[in-house]
Amino acid sequence: MTFGQINDSIPKRKAKSKKLTTNTNSYNPLSPSKAAFYSAIFPGMGQIYNKKYWKAPFVWGALAIPTYFYLDNNKEYKRFRTAFKLRKAGLQDEFTLDNGVQLASLETLERAQEQLRQNRDLSILSGIIIYILQIVEASVNAHLLQFNTDDMLTLKPVIIQDQFQLDTPSVGLTLRYTF
């Protein structure tokens, strides 16, 4: 018997493979803070972190609207402000024709400035509110992703047909909780 034959006759032990199992439903306490942090750094990134990709364009659009109105109102405010200053100095502004006819009075220029400044400030305020809300939404969504939401925890609205009054349908709500 040779050495090679002895090795062949000895049963080989199978190596146990270690499989790493990850529990996807485990609680991660840092997930909501990460989502909020990402949303604070770049709006919409927290929604992407939560794998709610469809929400990011809504965040960007919601922030683009007050940004557009801020820029537009600020441009118009500066335009009326410059005309007001020129008029006060006795110079010709864009609202005065070459023959000296004024298209807008001094009072109108002043009121337009006030209104445009208020609109500009409201645009800033609404942009800040939307920015904060998208951070809160990302954090709350990250919290809610860690909860159990299987089919046993559902509300199903049902139209209940009344057997005695067939001509007037009635609407009801049935709540079922199964253990």
Image (tube, rainbow, N blue to C red):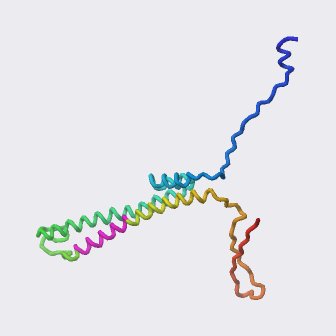
For the N terminus, give its image quadrant. Answer: top right
Most extreme residue toward the right, as rendered?
Answer: 1
- Choose top left, top right, bottom left or bottom right for residue 72: bottom left
Is 73 included in the stretch rendered in magenta?
A: no
Q: Is residue 30 left or right of residue 112?
A: right
Q: Nearer the viewer, residue 75 or 94?
A: 75
Q: Residue at x 31, y 66 (%)?
A: 73
Percent coordinates x, y for residue 155 in the rendering: 68, 70
Q: Main secondary structure of the magenta part?
A: helix
Q: Nearer the viewer, residue 94 or 152?
A: 152
Percent coordinates x, y for residue 138 in the rendering: 52, 58
Magenta segment, which residues? 109-124
Q: Nearer the viewer, residue 126 or 74?
A: 126
Is 110 included in the stretch rendered in magenta?
A: yes
Q: Residue at x 36, y 68 (%)?
A: 122
Above or below residue 72? Residue 18 is: above
Q: Is residue 157 left or right of residue 45?
A: right
Q: Is residue 123 left or right of residue 144?
A: left
- Choose top left, top right, bottom left or bottom right for residue 13: top right
Q: Residue at x 69, y 40 (%)?
A: 20
Most extreme residue toward the front, as rendered?
Answer: 29
Percent coordinates x, y for residue 31 in the rendering: 56, 52
For the C terminus, give its image quadrant. Answer: bottom right
Above or below residue 100? Residue 167 is: below
Q: Residue at x 67, y 48 (%)?
A: 23
Above or below residue 107? Residue 78 is: above
